Each structure stands twice: as structure tokens, then as C-alpha cells.
Amino acid sequence: MADDAEQTRDYRETVFLPDTPFPMRAGLPKLEPQILEKWAEADLYRAVRKARQDAGAPLFVLHDGPPYANGAIHIGHALNKILKDFVVRSRFALGFDVDYVPGWDCHGLPIEWKIEEQYRAKGRRKDDVPVAEFRAECRAYADKWIGEQMREFQRLGITGDWAHRYATMDYGSEAAIVAEFHKFVASGQIFRGSKPVMWSPVERTALADAEVEYHDHVSPTIWAKFPVQSGDERAKGAAVVIWTTTPWTIPANRAVSYNPAISYGVFEVEAIEQDLPFEPWAAPGDRLIVADKLADEVMKAAKVASFKRVSDVDCDRMVLAHPLAALDDGFGFKVPMLPGEHVTDDAGTGFVHTAPGHGADDYLVWLKSRQLLTELGVDQTIPDTVDPDSAYYPHVPLFPGLKVLETEGKKAGKFGPANGAVMEKLIEAGNLLARGRLEHSYPHSWRSKAPVIFRNTPQWFIRMDAALEDAVHGGKTLRQTALDAIDATAFHPAAGKNRIRTMVEGRPDWLISRQRAWGSPLAMFVDKETGEPLRDEAVNARIVEVIAAEGADAWFTRPAEDFLAGQDASKYEKVEDILDVWFDSGSTHSFVLENQREPGLPTHSPADLYLEGSDQHRGWFQSSLLESSGTRGRAPYKAVLTHGFTLDEKGEKMSKSLGNTIEPQSVIKDSGAEILRLWAGMVDYADDQRIGKTILQTTTDAYRKIRNTLRYMLGALAGFTDAEALPLEDMPPLERFILHRLWELDRDVRAAYEAYAFSDVTRAMIEFCQNELSSLFFDVRRDSLYCDRPDALRRRAARTVMDAAFERLTIWLSPLMPFTTEEAWSTRHPNAGPNTLRIIPETPAAWRNDAEAERWAKVQAVTSVVNGALEIERREKRIGAALEAAPQVAVAEAALAQAFEGLDAAEVFRTSQAELQSGETADEAFRLPEVPGVAVRPFRAEGTKCARCWRVLAEVSAPKFLCVRCDDAVEAWDIGQGAAA
RNA sequence: GGGCCUGUAGCUCAGGUGGUUAGAGCACACGCCUGAUAAGCGUGAGGUCGGCAGUUCGAGUCUGCCUGGGCCCA
């Protein structure tokens, strides 16, 4: 009976199999919210900060670029916030105290539109709504989305000071923004200029590009003559011909643009077409200047039957007369010719009539030609020609009061008398060459559907090129200050520096005013006589005080007297424009970084890092740079990190209409936020990244590899305590090698986090888990872990090293995979507090062991030959498991043979037995060309299979069928059971 | 149209200053194991390094052009 019982004894219960509650499958979508709840209870972000501050840790400031509080987050938001969280958590892990306050951009047009849309749906007009009520609705709308987005960001595991989140519409923020604006006013950096904007006369309002839609529209066209006054001698007595679809802009004309790359000629009219029903305006002998390529076309329009080319002509520095100069002295100014690349010879005459107050190109070429205009003695003022109703101002000669578009009654939106009147006067002056009609695409208001015009409007600008004689700038201009600040900033990647530099070098003055309702006001008064902003510190202080208490609404709802402490209100105009939203966000550093948001929390400016998408070179990076350069003479950041855009799987832009979008919400629901984070941790974020089904699958696979590695360690470490740990001196070579790898990885991981090279960490971790842990360390030590006595030195060494690896992997990975590492850490140490609280532990320098690294490279080379030989045996069905083999390995090269000194070859090869011999062996042995000098003869292991550890050994025999080691281990186990019972 | 960036195996990525048959992990195929099991181990098959031309004894790496893609402008 007893013998039978022994023979059939199932040794499984005596084997120390991995034992852990950490499941193989995470169920992240369900698990993550539980972990988030735990973090919330622990007030994780503040707890970590407190711990760091108590330890006297250095401060690291990441300043959050505010997303716009409008709509659910998309993948780009997710990537941006995840990368920021990598920074926050990795700096925490490196021992820093990290200041990160998430924020939102709240003012601006998109929200205004939403609210207007709601009004339209209810049949109300925006103009009928009191501004305070309108702004309140905008505020409520933004507030709703701040809450929504905050929940979504938090669901991604983003840590930060959510309790003190900032918003540009907070009263304190609005006051700070206005205070920043006042600094520009005080230092004389603000000026009133003008710029043509899209204007809807019917609605009496400026329109943004996105508010304009294009429809076909029939316009009159004219060919008009500008007599040459001076310039190329060959042009004497000739006239430059322009073509335009907006005759009403002729009174606003101040120049004619040409393109130096186009060839022009002087053409003389020889004969006019006969038998016309009307008298043409062209006459034989007329000399006209047009582009060679377009001469036929122009002559045809002018009903010229024959003409000849008289000469070439050079337009450089040519000056013309205004076509209406003969009728009124008011048009007696010089009309210079300006070179411009916007001019083409595809249509028209090859010249562009230039009215700087009524066209974007016109405006830009006018500004660019400042030098030339000065040299020619031309007045550079851009004239205001039409009023908000599109009627000519009284000061416009010949046409005062005439409207371009009708704005009242049934005819609203139709052409008024202006075009016709201008044509009549051109005829009278003898300078109309021809006219016609043209159906073309023309901008219309998307609301009223009425045509719009380009109209010069007064606007406020910040000067880029005025020398600033104050302590901050020391005589430098804003542009130069900003350029110097760029040089003092670190850009990752480095190309960003050049990119923003080019933009700042070439940008025009900063246009900061908008004729809108939802924003921070240009809260200032302007002297009605001089047009100069009032610079009065007491007034400004009062304005800021009121806004801080009541919000920016107060600026619009309270009378001027409330702010004008003592000043005569009748002398000043209250400016009710709002600030460009980029001024808002450009000011965030002032109220987020410099304000002490709560006693005890340190403040710090400039920030260590700004981290945004590469589009922000023109956006937030630049607005922040200009704002801070204007007010503080330096950038608000020490370093700028940019990431690319997220594209679909094929590398194409995502769009709802293409249906190729990946929503963060659906990834979270299907796979978990951790998968999205790991994706961000694997890609090269500096470049554009791709995401899609297969990519997410790859990510999930990588996740499983890491998770299973952690799980195996948890299982193998069951019951492990420090009492079991062994010192380095007692470690076998394999453990020393793993410790060496931990030492290397510690160095690499720290360097990678310092450099924000997150994918270097991820890659190193995955490869370590696969190559050194799973396929080497775990595989070799499985036998020891399962079968050695618990007090065996070999097993204790393995568990000691496994514990060290677990301790490090869980913190190295915690910035990238906070959920899983938290889960793993708390599984092993349920009472040790949050994993995120930890700092990457110091790694003893003594762990470095280059000799072991070299040894194991050699050992693995030999092992690969053994594996090759065993693979053939399997294929031939001579063996199955490696434990059925007992390879005989001949190693010719001394260095390779030496590598096995102190090692058990069978253990390394994971076979039951192995024989290692120096020198050559029989020719039929297995070899690999890439490992010369190693020959393997894969014999079957002779002996009996140990019923417990399954190794085939000669020492195993009936009745127990145990090897010596297992016999001993079972005995110890039995005694342990007895003691327990 | 302009400025900047970018294109290495099915996927994600490595490949200092140009130098032997271009690497890794995953996926894939095949085999093994069945005491990490929707796991583990092993073996293998995948690439004209976007294309063309040039510099060079030699280019994935340097230059030019072309092409695909992206961001920002016009």
C-alpha cells in the first residue's frame, strides 16, 4: 500500500508554481476607473507634490497649453495630454516636484457662433441680445465643455492640479490679461492702424474667413487707363491699363502693381472696329501699356481692330496719374507702380489696380513697399473710403454718400449706385477703355447671404519694430527681443527653432483687436482729440480691480465714469473691441506661473517646458513668446517640445467625412486608456504618428508581453520578503548578469526620460522583458523556482534579483503605464501606498559587471547552436521537450569554452544533461556558420524522468522516481506541512 | 505656389562623424511544451532602406531632382 501510494504520489502540490491574484487579462476598461478612484481618494497629485517638497526636491514646471473649451476631445488632444503626463510622471519618478496646472482657452469666435446659432434657432438676432446676456451664455457653454474635457482627460490618467485648473475666462484671468494689455499700452507698444477686413454692409459687421461662403455673382468689369507721369521714357504719353471687377474701389486706388517677371509692352491703336452700335472709347493713336501675353485680349475688349507693339517698357519706379485726377484735385496724388508677386498675366491686363484699403494683396504690397513709397515721396496713409454702410465718406471727392451695396429694404444686398457713378466719371475723364460684365465666384456672408466687401477698418496693433527704450528691452525692438529669446530657448526637435524664427522675422505687426463680443476687452480709453490711448495708472488699476471682481463683462456694462477715476469722461472714447484670443493664451504664463495659486505652492517662471503640437509654432509658442518678450523681455519658457499630428493608418489626415477617425473614447471603451498611452509611448511623437486598427493591435500585443512578465514575477515572488534576500557576493553568474542589465537600463531609462525620449524607454522595456527576462532568466530559473527547496541559495538568489527587477520595472514603466504598474505594485505591496509616489531607486554601481555581459553574449551564442541542433531532433521526432536531450557540445575556441566556467551547461541549455568539451568533435555534429568553432551532438538524455521536476537523470529510480534534489525538497516540504498541521 | 518636416520588413521602431551578407520587438508560418496556458520556449520566412541621378574605391547614411504624406502660410 505504502509503496503504491509513493509511486503514484502526485508531486504537483510540492511544486512552487507561480501564485498571484494578478490576472493575465487586465480588463482595463473596467479596472482603470477603479484605480482612478483610488488615486482620487489619495489626492495623488498633491500627495506626490507634498512628498517631494518635504524632501526638498527641485521644482520642474510644465505649463499647459490650453485646449479650446468646445467639444469632446479628439485623438490629438489625447496624445498631447498623454505626452504631458509622461513628462509629469517621469519627472516625479526622477524625484522632481512637478508643477502642472491644466487649463482651458475659453474666449473666441467658435463659441460665439454656437451661441448665435442657438439664438437663430429661436428666431432671435444677436444684436437684440444685451451683451452681458450673450457673454453669459458663452461663458456657460465654455464651462460645460471644461467639465466634459476635464473628465475625459482624467479618464486617460492625466495627473495634474485639476482642483486649481485655470481658464482664460476666469475673472482673475481676465483681469490679468487686461493688466498685461495695459503693460503694452503703458510702454507705448500699441498703436491704432487699419487693415482691410471682410465686411458685410448689410449686417454692419466684420466677418472672419470662416464666416464667408462663395457664390456666383455678376459684377461689372472695367478696363481703366492710368496716364504715365514719369518713369521709362518709352512710356511717355501712354497709359497703363488695369482691369477690375470692383469699379467702386477706384477712388481708393493708390498704386498699380506689376510683376517684374512679366514682359510688358507699349501698344499703339491703329484702327477701331467699324459698324459698332456704340462709339468705342479707344481711338487711333492711343498708346496703351499691357502685358504682351494679354494685349490681344485687351484690344479685343476695347474694340480695337488693329494695333502695333511700339516698344518694351520698364515699370520700375514709374509714376502714374489717378484716372480721375482731371476731374478733382482730390485725386491729384501720385500713383506709384509697385512690384508684387501676386500679379499674374493669366487674365486682365497684367497689372493690378491697388487699393490698400480694400484688398488683402493690395494691403500687403502697400506695406511691403514702404521703402519705395518713401523714396518716391508718396503719402503712405491708407485711406478710409467707405463707411460701415458701404457709402463713400463725405471726404471722398465726386462720390460722397453713394453706396456700394444697398443695405435697406427690398434691395438690400444689391449693388448701389457707386459702381455706375465711378464708370460715368471715368468716361468723363476719358480714362475708361472698355467695360463688361462677369459672372464669378464672390464672397458672401454665410448668415445674410449678402455680398461682402473688403473694407479698411481701424484696428489696434502691437508694434514689432519700434525701439523700446525701457529697462526690459534696452532699446531693442519687440521683434529683436523675441528673436533673442528664441536663441535662448532649447527646441526639441531642434528644427523648431528655425521654424519659429523665420515666422517671427517675417511677421507683420500683431493685430490684437477684434470687433466681437466674447473675449477679454482692450480695456482702455482713447483721447477723442488725439486718438492716443489714455495712460493713467490709477485708471488702469481701477479697471483691473473691477474686472477681477466682476469679470470682463463689467467693462461692457458699466459706464465709463466708473473707471475714469477723476478724468473727464466726455474727453475719452471707451474702446469696446476685444482682444485676439491669442493674446489671451499668450498671457497664461502671467497668471498661471507667476501667481501663487495657493499658499505653500512654489511659483516659477519661466516654465521649464511648453509641450504642444507643431502647429503652435505659429500659435501659442509664438503668442506667448511675443507677449512675454513685450512685457518681460524674455520667453516664458526655457524649452519647447513639439509633437506631430496623428494620422490614420495609411498616413492620411483624419476626417469625419472620410470616416477614418479613431476616437480616444472608443479606444478607452474597447481596450483601455493604458493602450492609448502605450501607443503614445511607442511612436516617434516628434514626427507625425499613425493610428488605426492594426497599430492598436500591435500595441495590445506589446501590452500583453509586459503584463505577463509582471505577472510571472508576481507569481514567482509569492511570499518573498527581505529576509530571503541574498547579497551580491552570493549571486550566481546569471543573477549577476541580470543585475548588470538592470544597472544598464537604469542609466538608459533615466537618460531617456531626461530627454523626453519615451519610445526609447518603451522599446528597452519590451526587449528586456522578452530577451533577458522571459526567454533567458525566467526560462532558466523556472526549474529552480518551482523545484528547489525554498531555502536553496540558488532559488533565493533568483528571487532576490526578481524582486529587484520587479521593483524597477514597475517604476520605470509607471509614467507610461500608470494603471498597470499601480495594479502590479499594489498586488505585491498592498500597504505600500501609490506606486506613483515612488522615486526610481538608486542602482548600486557594484551591479555593473561588464565581464558577465561578455560572458552571456558568448553563452547565448553557444546556446543558439544547441537550439539549432535540438530543433532538428524535434523535427525528426527523436525528442520533444528539451528535457529529453543531453547535448554534447564541443567548443574549439578557448574564449567560448571559458565562458562556461562556473556554469551548469544543462541548466543554461534547459536540457536534462549536457556535456561540454574543449576542442573539435566528429564531422557529423551540428554547426551554425555564424558561430564557428561550436559543434553539437544532440544525444537523448539517458535515465529516468524525475516525477517532480521532469528532468531525465540516471539518479532517478523507483520507488519515488525523484532526483536527489527533489527528494530533498519533498522531504523538506513534507516536514513543513507537518509543522503547519 | 512658398517655408519647415517626413517616407527603413505586415505594424512600431534602431541604424554617432558614409565601410563587411541592413537590425530589434511584435505580428506571421512551422515545431515543442501543457506545472506562466486566450500563456511559455524554439526555428524560420519577410526589406530594390519612396524613386531617379550624382559625389565617392564604397551611400540607408552626403548632394540634386522627382514623388507620396504632414504642419504652417499664400
Image: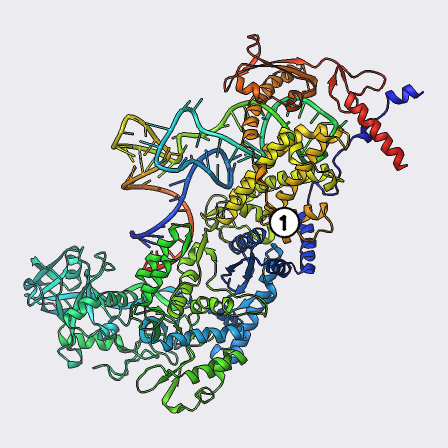
Does A435 sit above or below residue A963?
A: below
Residue nearest the observer in this picture, A685 or A280: A685
Does A610 sit above or below residue A137?
A: above
- Colour scheme used in the picture? rainbow
- The N terminus of chain A, quarter of image: top right
What residue is disc 1 on?
Answer: A672
- The C terminus of chain A, quarter of image: top right
* Position of residue A849 measured from the top left corner of the image (x, y, whole percent): 56, 33
Residue nearest the observer in this picture, A159 or A31: A159
> Residue at image x 66%, y 38%?
A708
* Position of residue A827 measured from the top left corner of the image (x, y, whole percent): 72, 46
Left or right: A756, with A52 as reference point:
left
Secondary structure under the numbered disc 1 in the rendered image: loop
Where on the picture, by quarter, is residue A242? Answer: bottom left
> Residue at image x 68%, y 29%?
A781
Residue type at mark 1 is: Gly
* Residue A694 visible in rendering: no
* Position of residue A666 measured from the top left corner of the image (x, y, whole percent): 60, 51
Residue nearest the observer in this picture, A139 or A88: A88
* Position of residue A342 measured from the top left corner of the image (x, y, whole percent): 25, 60
Where on the picture, by quarter, is residue A289? Answer: bottom left
* Residue A160 visible in rendering: yes
Which class describes the residues within 10 Å of circle 1: few (<14), some (14-19), or many (20+)? many
Where on the picture, by quarter, is residue B17? Answer: top left
Q: Chain of mark 1?
A: A
Q: Residue furthest right?
A: A1
